[in-house]
Image (cartoon, rainbow, N blue to C red):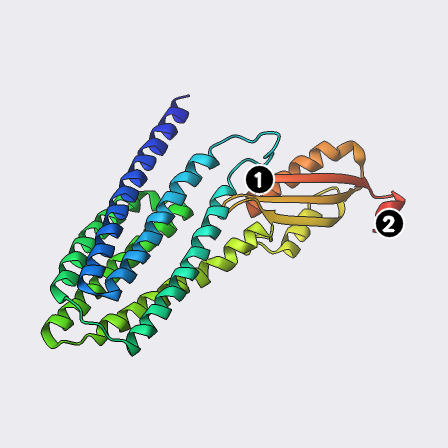
Amino acid sequence: MGDNHHHHDIDTMGDRRLGWAIAINMVLTLAQVIGGIVSGSLALIADALHNFSDAAALLIAWAARKISRKPPDYFRTFGYKRAEVIAALINLVTLVILGLYLIYEGLWRIYEPQAIEGWTVVIVAGIALVIDVATAILTYSMSKHSMNIRAAFLHNVSDVLASVGVIGAGSLILLYGWYWTDTALTLLIAGYVLYQAATMLPGTIHILMEGAPEDISIEEVIDAMARVEGVASVHHVHLWQLDEHKNALEAHVVIDDFGRSDIIKTALKTELAQRFSILHSTLEFEVDHCPESANS
């Protein structure tokens, strides 16, 4: 009971931190958009949109944490943990659309250059830098224990770098009138956004397609199961990811003695859990002399 209460307190603290991070990032996004429109800086607007995507990622992480705590029911017998994966897919698709839009706007600016107010860019980007650092601090400790939050934290780190870049572009505009740096930075931010999406999207789709964990070889799993005492062979093996942390397996196991099925089952589940971190497994036993097994 004490452990559950402690875990609840940690979750509540994490939700509160995410709430603050979302709120300040939404305010920052609005300030950057206004600053970008007033100054004419596309890079500032690009940074604002990137920051908005990060705020959305934090919001998705917060909502997913809430949903994932719901216990399994008759409609979702595996529970609601995969809500985080679905949310990640939505966020990544949005990143792709955002990146393509920024490239379009950046290329259009090459043909139609626009005057940019450097001081506005530097001031707004400086404020953004402070808020990005504060957000990264809020999520840093949580990122050590959650892949979902770690991704959001890395987004915040990229925001810090983008803000530094925007400050640099604004400074070059003030010092030398190099307006082209704004467009160049916009294209760099767009490229980085697309790179992030391209890196994370395949893994997200892989989980939703019930793919096998990339760090587990199904051949090794079958071999390890077949080596358990009393097991003659293993077939019809299905291995997939329930979510980013939990793996599941189902298989038909041919055994020598049906009277030892409980002992063999315990040994198999222990091997799967300790060696491959497969905590959910469904095993169907068949006797070695069964005609069906012989034909399998």
Q: Nearer the viewer, residue 33 or 5?
A: 33
Where disc 2 sits, the SS reads helix
Give the residue drawn at x 11%, y 63%: 119
Give the residue drawn at x 31%, y 33%: 13
Q: Are marks 2 and 1 in contact (CB under 8 Å)?
A: no
- In this rendering, the count of numbered labels is 2
Name the residue that disc number 2 marks. 294
Q: Position of residue 124 (x, y in %)?
A: 17, 57
Give the residue drawn at x 22%, y 72%: 114
Q: Is residue 292 left or right of residue 42?
A: right
Residue 109 occupies which quadrant of the picture? bottom left
* 9, above or below 294, in the image: above
Residue 145 visible from this viewpoint: no
First-in-chain label (2 vs 1): 1
Mark 2: which amino acid? Ala
Q: Position of residue 31 (x, y in %)?
A: 21, 52
